[in-house]
Image (cartoon, rainbow, N blue to C red):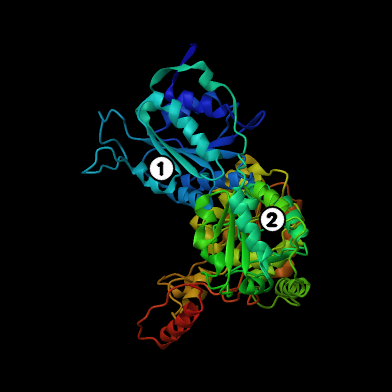
Amino acid sequence: MTTIRLTAAQAMVRWLAAQESAPGVPFLGGVWAIFGHGNVAGLGEALHGVRDRLPTFRGHNEQSMAHAAIAYAKASNRRRAMAVTSSIGPGATNMITAAALAHVNRLPVLFLPGDVFASRLPDPVLQQVEDLGDGTISANDCFRPVSRYFDRITRPEQLLAALPRAMGVLTDPAECGPVTLAFCQDVQTMAFDWPERFFAARLWRPRRPRPDVDEIAAAVAALTQAKRPLVIAGGGVLYSEAAADLAAFCEAHDLPVAETQAGKSALPHDHPLNLGSIGVTGSSAANAVAADADVVLAVGTRLQDFTTGSWALFGNPDLRIVGLNVAAFDAGKHGALPLVADATAGLADLDAALAGWRADGDFTALKAEWDAAVDAATAAPASDNALPSDALVIGAVQRASNEDTVVVCAAGGLPGELHKLWRASRPNGYHVEYGYSTMGYEIAGGLGVKMALPEREVVVMVGDGSYMMMNSELATAVMLGRKLIVVVLDNRGFGCIDRLQRATGGESFNNLLDDALHETPARIDFAAHMAAMGARTEKVAGIAELEAALARARASESTYGIVIDTDPMITTQAGGAWWDVAVPEVSTREEVRAARAAYEQATARRLP
């Protein structure tokens, strides 16, 4: 057997660089790295040696680097991914939030945090977290509950088993999610005689499991007996690259479609069977059909509470759910008839089994009514005398966009408004992280999207609160020459939570900047801040100025930031559904008691 002597870190990066998602296409699009004492001498030196095949990018925060990596994987429909490495201590724990985000959203990312010395000879080392009752614990154990696969590399030869297991998880459609290989810093530098064949190129083809024949039969029986069926399209449709298959399936059987946050853009917004968003931030059309549906075919969705209206959206007591999902865990949720399969394969087999069957329904009026509501909410105002709503800003951004535009957002009130109002024409044109609703994802996520889809215009819409949480990768976008258009909506605080606070009977408290305990009112110049990081910027007053600025931003070859003040109180009233946010049973305030009474009435309507 021919061997080659390398350090463990050198072997790891050489092996990773040899993994392919298609012939000649590396699975990893690069490695994000901030070096410290726990990874600079081992992984740092190793990454330098393969930089021509596996590029290394430097960001400004470990969490935001990981967000960029995750967005890259999502925009690539999980066909490609990135790795992120940090030193031990705060660099590693900074990435925990991003790991949770990837875990919730079933997205692949490889975390390579440095770890303590396997030898333990210099313990406690700088930044080491010591457990008084367990000598094997380090800060990296925080990754365990938010990783699909976790391993600690304490000997070089462990990589012979750990690396293939890691790639198996990153590329498996059902198990897909974050992988953490905590890499002891002394082990990174240790040499070993590696089998040369270990570094041969390997192609990881997407697996497309087909459904069980009995599960197909049960699904067909449910659908053919349905009087009011509905299809819910989730993120799994996009990850399977099954958008065209979904359209053909629903056209063949005349089935209406509603889209989750992750599934939005699976069908063009103007497709006659696309009723728009569903659930808490849903369209009136989709939610009306969902309320009466007797069979729901849930394709590639986790059916989380925003999709189901906390399970109060569905009003038919005879409702049956068919869960077409590559993960058995998701397919059988809430008593669903499981149809465990890849979306493409499952729709193909279901289509064949349903040959000749068509549902009976006309959704033209419902769709037209919702389209009119969207038009009304987003139309340019007659004057700019008042602060605009988020919806008006969305309308301006929409008018400045085309079918190749990708809109990126994450947390706050904007995702709800975008889910309702944004009109996506092509798959992946809508990129909103709402499974974990992570404030600070937006700009880093936009950078990841642009790296995955360089030919498409990427527009990041972000509130002032989320911008303040994490914005430093704007400088990275500028330095890398990856153009973003960033629209900052400044409503002076956490507007959507302030509205929720009021809706549950509370006083406006500690959410808006002007309602908090501050001696000096905040006067944050977001345009100047973005300019300081290298972007071209301007602040606009009103929608007309915004539209003109967006035209300049599109014509620009460099990253462009636009700031506009918005009203924190206004939200789109059309559409929507109840969301279970528990209200106190006891309060001295009448507003809270009234909200509790309304809450109890709402929970009573939820199907068991």
Name the residue tied to disc 1: 92
- Residue at image point 52% right, 57% down: 332
Quadrant of the rendered structure where residue 302 is? bottom right
Mark 1 lies on a secondary structure that is helix
Is residue 438 in view? no
Give residue 56's position: percent from left, percent from top: 55, 33
Residue 434 vs residue 36: left or right?
right
> Picture coordinates of residue 575 (x, y %)?
64, 74
Q: Nearer the viewer, mark 2 or mark 1?
A: 2
Dot 2 amino acid type: Ala
Q: Is residue 514 above or below residue 338?
A: below
At x 58% / y 75%, what residue is drawn?
315
Q: Nearer the viewer, residue 76 or 188?
A: 76
Instruction: Tell me which label, 2 or 1, sits earlier in the chain.
Output: 1
Secondary structure beneath disc 2? loop
Residue 341: percent from the left, percent from the top?
Answer: 60, 48
Toward which corner of the image does residue 582 lie, by quadrant? bottom left
**Three-letter code for the amino acid on which mark 1 is drawn:** Ala
Q: Locate residue 65 relative to residue 134 in the image: left or right.
A: right
Compare residues 407 and 373 and report the one nearer the observer: 373
Label 2 crowd (10 A; few <14 / some 14-19 / many >=20): many
Residue 386 seen in this snapshot: yes
Crowding around mark 1 (Cα neighbors within 10 Å: few <14, some 14 to 19, many 20+) is many
Q: Is residue 260 left or right of residue 246?
A: left
Q: Residue at x 53, y 18 (%)?
A: 197
Find the distance from the CA under tag 2 to the CA under tag 1. 35 Å
Which residue, given by chain and number where applicable, does mark 2 sit on? 266
**Residues at discs 2 and 1 in contact (Cβ within 8 Å):** no
Please give the count of numbered marks on the rendered protein: 2
Q: Is residue 39 left or right of residue 72?
A: left
Quadrant position of residue 188: top left
Q: Is residue 383 above or below residue 446?
A: below
